[in-house]
Amino acid sequence: MSHFLIYTEDKPDSLQIRQENRAAHLDWVRNDPKVTLLSAGPWLDDAGDMRGSLLIVGSDSLKTVEDWLAQDPYGKAGLTGFKRVRAFNWLIGAPD
């Protein structure tokens, strides 16, 4: 299994979209068997509002991760303004 880092930034003024789709996103990210979720959470702006996400996942390929992300309720709702997926070499704190 390879590790991948996923970084997203929400579109400006989209906190309501995030809040309206949060339950569906969390259900999807926790229960879709296509990838293994290893770590995840929102990152916050200076006001403390959620403005994007950072995930570390395990998968057999980058294509699998990209196909998986295409099903994200946040993306489908138009929340995501920027997304970057990169292979990740987890050295410190990696799961066993």
Image (tube, grey):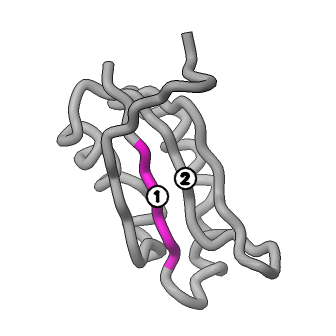
Image: magenta residue range: 5-10
Q: Residue at x 50, y 32 (%)?
A: 37
Residue that lies at the very extreme toward the bottom in this rendered image? 13
The image shows a total of numbered marks equal to: 2
Relative to 90, 27 lies left or right: right
Direction from residue 46 to residue 67 in the image, left or right: left
Circle 1 sits on which residue?
7
Q: Magenta stretch containing residue 7, yes or no?
A: yes
In the displayed structure, would residue 89 be above or below residue 73? above
Q: Residue furthest front?
A: 91
Q: Are marks 1 and 2 in contact (CB under 8 Å)?
A: yes
Q: Which residue is mark 2?
A: 54
Q: Secondary structure at mark 1?
A: strand
Tell me what residue is drawn at x 39 percent, y 73 percent: 82
Rendering coords of residue 64 (x, y %): 23, 37
Please say if 76 is above or below 89.
below
Of the residues under marks 1 and 2, which one precedes in the sequence? Answer: 1
Count residues near mark 1 (Cα–Cα under 10 Å), then give few for <14, some for 14-19, many for 20+. Answer: some
Which residue appears at 32% of the width and 25% of the height?
2
Q: Amino acid at mark 1?
A: Tyr
Q: Compare residues 58 and 94 and report the one nearer the observer.
A: 94
Element carrying mark 2: strand
Give how far apart the Cα atoms at labels 1 and 2 are.
5 Å
Residue ranking furthest to the left: 63
Residue type indicated by callout 2:
Leu
